[in-house]
Every structure is written in C-alpha cells, then in structure tokens.
Amino acid sequence: MSTAVLAARACARTILWQSLRLADFHGAVPHVLLVVDRSPCALQKVLLEGYLRELELVNGAPPDAAGGGPLRVDLDPAAPTPCFSAGLDKDWRVTYGVLPFRAASFLEEVRALQAFLRQCGPPVAAEEEAGGGGRWSEERRKSAFESLAPLLAPYAAAAAASGEAAGDCGAWRGELLHALPAGPPRELLGCILIQRHAFQNELEKYRLRLDLFNMGLRVAEHNHLECMSRTADALAGGKDGGSRERCLEEEEIIHYMQSCSLQPQVAESVGRAIADSIDAWSWKRHSVAADGGEGVTVDVVPPASFSEALANADVLSVYNAGVLRWEGGSGAESTRRSRAEADGSAAALKISGPGAPLRIVCHDGKVLSFEGGLEDCLLNTGYYAAAHTEERNCVRRHRQRFPVSAAAEPTKEEGEGEGYTAPEPGASEAEKRGRLKKKEYLATLKLTGRKTAAGRASSPSDGNDEGVRRGGHDCGACVGSSIGGTFPVGEVISESFDLSKLNGTCSVFAYPSLFKEVTMSDPEPVAMRIEKGVVTDIGPNAPAELVELIGLVRQAEGACYVRELGIGLSPHVGRGRVVSDVSAFERQFGVHISLGQRHPLFVKQPGKRNADGSMAVRVEGPVLKRKAGKYHIDVFLDAARLEMGAFVVDFTKGVCAAPPSAAAAATRA
C-alpha cells in the first residue's frame, strides 16, 4: 500500500474513533457522511480513500481487502466524485455515504438524510418525546427514499452511472427499501468535510460547521487542500502510470495527513501541561491574612497535569525526554503539600501583580519577552469532552437534544400531521448568518429551558474558535457540546494580557505569502524587533513580501501590534516537513505569533480582576474590542526554548521519530 494511503488511514482512524468517538454511540448504527468537491484534487481523493478503507476495515473487511486495490476516485484530474453509500444493507457497525458538494442543496440534503435515517428500523424508546416526529407512512417513506436515491445508491450503481443519474439503475432500490425498515435504528452522526478550499465560501454562511453542530453532528473539517496538492496534482496528470505512483509518495500531502493523525490524548496531555504551567506563572498570588491584609506569597509548583504528562507513555512515545522541564523545583512531598494548600485556598488568593515573564529564546540567542501576564490559555487538541458523555452517546438522549427540524421534512405541508413544528420566527434570517446574536441566543435558551454554563461566555462562538476550548470546555454553536473542528489539531493559544508589555527581538523563519501560503525566510531567519507590543523594525535581509505584509498592517491599523502567542504541538510538520496551508502549519512543534490587531478569541480588558471582582492590575496598553483590526498574520519563530519561571519547553530536544502509519499496529475502535 502507498505511503499516502497509509497516512490517510492513520488520519481517518484518529479522527473517527479517537476525536469524534463515533464507535461509542449506542442504540442506533451511526452513519458518516463524507463530503467532497465534485472535482477533487489529488489530496482530497487520497484522504477520502483513507476514510473509506478505515471504515471498511472496522466493519470486518480483511486487512488485505481494505488495504489494496485502486482508489475509489481515480487520480485522473478529470475524475469526478461519485455519490454513493455503503453498509446500509449489511450488518455494519458504522455505515457511510459519499456526497459531492452542491452549495444550493447541501444543507437540505443533510437534513433530509438525517430525518430519513431516523425512520429506519424499529422506533427508539420514547421516540415521540425524543423529537422523532412520529413514524412516517409507507408512501412518505418511499417518497423520501426516491429523493435520496442518488446518495443511498451502492458504489457499483454509482460507478455504472454518472452525474445526477447515479442512483437510477439496478435492482438495489427495492432491496434496500425493504431492508432499511427491517434493519436496526440508524442515526446520521458524523460529517467529514474534505474541501478543496472551504465550502462555506460557496454558501451564505459565516461558519457552515455551526449549522451541522446544531443538528447534533460530529464534524471534522479538512480545508484549503488545493494549495497542498499542486505537486501531487501535476504528477497525477502525467501521461504515464509512473507519475500516478509517484503522486502517492508526494511528501507534502503525506505530511498533511500525518499531521491529522496526532492522537488527541497525546495533544491533550502535553497541551494541558503547557497551558496550566503558563497560567500558573502568569500572575503573582498571595493569601489573605486574618485581618484582611496581605498574607504570604504563594509559591508556584508544578501543576498536576505537568506530572501526568511526564508519566504518560503515549506522550513519551512522541516527545523526547527533556522537552518539558521544571527546573530547580522542590521535592515531591513539598510539591504535593504546596499544591494541596494552593488548591484548597484558591478562592481566597489575591493577585498582586504580573508573574514571571514568558521568554521565547531563538536559536541565534534573540529573546522575546512577555512581561505583563498572559491571557488564560486555550487548547485545540482534538479532545472533545462532550464526545465522552452518555448524553451524546445514547441515541434516545441524542434525539431529545437534537430533534429533526421542520426544514428536514420538505414534503410536509404546513400543519400536516402530528409532530409538525412551524419554523421559529427569524429562523431563516439566523440561518443566513450562520450564528445567533447574543440577545437572540439568550432568548432561545429561555424558550427551550436551557441555561448558560456558569463562568462562560453566554453567546455562541462566532466561528473563529476552530475547536478551541476555554477552561476545559468546548466552544461552538451549542456551547459546551460541540464535537469536532478543523484538522489538524495540536495548539496552545494565548497572548499578552497587556499588549504593551511585549518587548524584545525574535527570528522569523516562515511567514504567509500574499496568497496566504507558507513561505520560508531563505536563506536564513529574519530578525524582527518588537517594542511595547508593536513591530518597530525588521532585519535588512527581510524578503520584500514580508516587508509588504507589515506595511499593509501599518497602513490599515496605524501600528503593527503583536497579538496571538501560539505553541504548536505536532511532530508531523515543521521546518523539514513544510505544508503550504498556514492553518495546518500553525500546529508545527514550535512557536508562532500573529501580526495585526485582529484576534477574536480574546476580548481585551482594562485590567486583571480577582475572583471577588476587585481590580488587581491595570493595563497600560490598548484595550481592543473583540473584532478590532483587519489583519491576523501568523509568522513562525525560530524558537529554541520557551521559558517561564522554572517551567521550560525545550524545542531543541525535538520529537521521537514519527511513527509509521502501519495499520497493523493501530488500535481499532
């Protein structure tokens, strides 16, 4: 089997079973929808093939059968994506369908498929209360089946036909129409978006993923694949068969798919250790004396997550010893005692000022220092807490939470039958935006009897989160319950709490081109000077394109501020394993910062407050609004170490050799 297909299967295995956890769902057979451009690039075709082979393997196909043979979508650049499903007439654990993306009908097709699959098999317990809308008549079920026939067709029927007529031939229709009601309950649970660019650009949607989250789907997005597929596409278009074979060994598409196979438990463990350590060192804290005065300063000790990461065998299989260090720490017993004392009195502690500066030390000795405290770290690790809960893995409770909407039943006339629900006022307008305003969201919560999670933002994410979590919870369309995001994952995100407290010089080894593709600062990294949070100077060897980018920021925003501090966790991308997509390259094991005022993940505050609301530290820099600025340009630093107090992330220690994508060694669902 080619290296590319092995990498694609490793990617699919990680996302389907470890991040989205589709195999944990019980009470109905989960169905996965794989959505691809109608004319896909080579990377899309290989990635799709990896998902199909992994799904067939988990459903009992012999490893040889699931591992060999030609790709389902030929590498010929003119070969279109077929429309078909598999496993609906078999005793499969997880079934799937492949859908070529059509902007005009996509959401309607997904809603219709969800409603139809809920009519398969016997009724789920308490289905009426669960939002099932009652059982359909035979005539209505047959009508829905015919409208979905192109998608429900088996691969053989799709391969024998073309275009819209993909399901119009063969005897499979009658057999499947008879088998579905007699089979087990089924649930459309997963949606994998494999995109040449981004499907949402073809829709009037700010974030397509939010609509799918609102349906209860677990979503994985692969976007901007075309820019990473150009070399593979050129090879696939060659006249000789040898070019096709070389296409499946092309390095960039392999690096991308391997980066999507970073296991969430590994990223979560090391990411949590880094985040908790940075949060612990960001602020000086002291206890409160009995008379209300200032008590003793609380020592910073290694958080529990730090020790857990060092003892995690999965982490040690990826990262070399010494990557995470706590230098000059106290003994284990005093550390446990200090941690217990700190945890027990956390609510009574007061902040007395910024803590230890966070220093990024580059390979050439240049140092960038964050001295005014940092924002509480966010995580993007592919670990979704909601996917581990019974509420989301029990079909009855899942359907109660995510009932089929009236929009999924186009054949019903208004007022027809029991269970019909009229569209809510303003629903279509909200759908166009792809999200709700805060006032509308709170009204929806009140109408449905749900409450906002304490200590969390009350409005849903605006779609810029890309799967990040605040305080250990997921963010998304359904606050605290969204499962999925954009892959690859593996990042700890923060920024200077006081933007004016960032000073020093750093070396930039890569930056985005004007076409938003990763470009190396050849032949050597570029020095960049930052004073009071603003880029003030750049080295004479800076590429003209990087100089132009900084000029664009200054022209639009006045000064080129630095905002995001991102710490990538992935061993599969980096200086020697470059991918062209900036979002994917952000996950490289190292550090990147963003230029420009725009960074919606953090709302700047005039000061840091204590738990009781009292002001502890006032900022001196600008207090930017959530959507301030126009630009967010990621540049990648030639970082050797991250230092903060006794905590060190040593990037020079590197990572263990990237594990092979051998399917035989993988853990199955």
Image (cartoon, grey):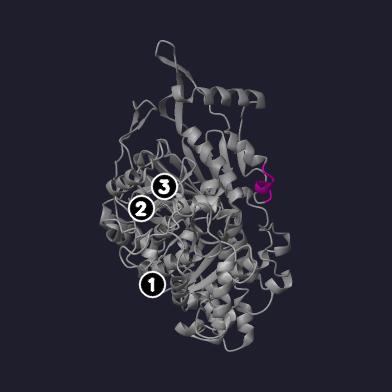
Report the disc number at residue 479. 3
- Is the magenta region chiefly helix, strand or loop? helix
Cβ atoms at labels 2 and 1 below 8 Å apart: no
Residue nearer the viewer, 465 or 228? 465
> Which quadrant is the N terminus positioned in?
bottom right
Q: With 251 as the anchor, is 505 left or right in this view?
A: left
Q: Which residues are magenta?
A: 312-317
Of circles 2 and 3, the one toward us is: 3
Q: Is residue 115 magenta?
A: no
Report the amino acid beneath label 3. Answer: Val
First in sequence, mark 2 or 3: give its number.
2
Of circles 1 and 3, the one toward us is: 1
Report the disc number at residue 462. 2
Q: Point out residue 10 in the picture as x, y percentages from the top left corner.
A: 63, 63
Q: Residue at x 52, y 68 (%)?
A: 34
First in sequence, mark 1 or 3: give its number.
1
Report the amino acid beneath label 2. Answer: Asp
Residue 544 visible in rendering: no
